[in-house]
Amino acid sequence: MIELQEVYKKYRNGVTAINGIDVRINQGEFVYVVGPSGAGKSTFIKMMYREEVPSSGTISMNGVNLAKLKMSKVPIFRRNLGVVFQDFKLLPSKTVYENVAFALEVIEAQPKFIKKRVMEVLDLVNLKHKARMLPTELSGGEQQRVSIARSIVNSPKVVIADEPTGNLDPETSWEIMNIFEEINTRGTTIVMATHNREIVNTIKHRVIAIEGGKIVRDEQRGDYGYEN
Ligand code: ADP
């Protein structure tokens, strides 16, 4: 469960990006975060994976208060959370297999388990046959599938995605969405910032709209609701 209470975020330059947010997201939900550019979506998302810290208020993620989490505890917290970015952020000198295995190697999982689990998640994203390739040898959609495999290899309860289809063509975007759907069906919470109106209006889920750092709409099976 994710819960934000009276969350404010003012950046050092004086910009208030989040201006009082209270929201609760239950385990297993799929939530789209929408809103115009500059609304505060990225800040909202970044606070959930502890890339940014709120200026005040509390953010509780599966019982951990992120606003109070010590820097030294951040890596441990992140192990239980999957994050997917618009620009994939894969390690360029590592193969597909190595990119996904990395998260399990740092926690010193058993080599036999690592192999089994990595192949399992590569199978889920339909990339088992490209395990030995480098990211540069893959299409954008394939790279995003690797990054999704990496995000779930530790079996996190929550996956946070910041515009995961932002760099992809429409057809590839649907493929990526199908994978997120599958992951969500298996019980993982998904929080996804997106500008993709067609996807939001077709694959219906809860929609949280942010404007001026506040939640202006929160609807189950909502629409995208903006002109562009
Ligand atoms: P969105 O993702 O909806 O486009 P952001 O969360 O990126 O919105 O930005 C919200 C506001 O905060 C904007 O006015 C933006 O310029 C500002 N902002 C974002 N990141 C920073 C930062 N690191 N430092 C200062 N201001 C920032």
Image: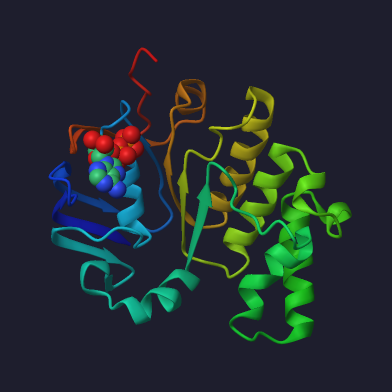
Q: Is residue 161 above or below residue 212?
A: below
Q: Percent position (x, y) of residue 97?
A: 78, 64
Residue 98 x %, y %: 75, 67
Specify whether residue 26 is in view: no
Residue depicted at x 37% and y 23%:
223
Q: For this rendering, which residue is in front, 162 or 92?
A: 92
Report the side of 220 relative to 76 (left or right).
Answer: left
In this orientation, which residue lies closer to the viewer: 167 or 227?
167
Q: Nearer the viewer, residue 137 or 108?
A: 137
Horizontal side, residue 4 vs residue 140: left or right? left
State left or right for residue 89 relative to residue 16.
right
Q: How many marks?
A: 0
The part of the image, by quadrant, that contains residue 165 is top right
Q: Nearer the viewer, residue 43 or 30?
A: 43
- Report the colour scheme: rainbow
Query: Could you say which quadrant of the image residue 53 lies in?
Result: bottom left
Specify the quadrant that holds the C terminus: top left
Work out which residue is located at the far top of the displayed protein and give it.
227
Residue 5 falls in which quadrant of the image? bottom left
Where residue 103 appears, x then y in whole percent? 61, 72
Q: Is residue 50 visible?
A: yes
Name the residue: 28% across, 32% down. Answer: 38
| Ligand 1: image quarter | top left
Q: Is 93 situated above or below 72?
A: above
Residue at 39% in and 59% down: 27
- Residue at x 35%, y 53% (from the top left corner): 46
Above or below for 174 versus 2: above
The percent position of residue 28, horizontal first and vertical second, equals 43, 55
Image quadrant occupied by the N terminus: bottom left
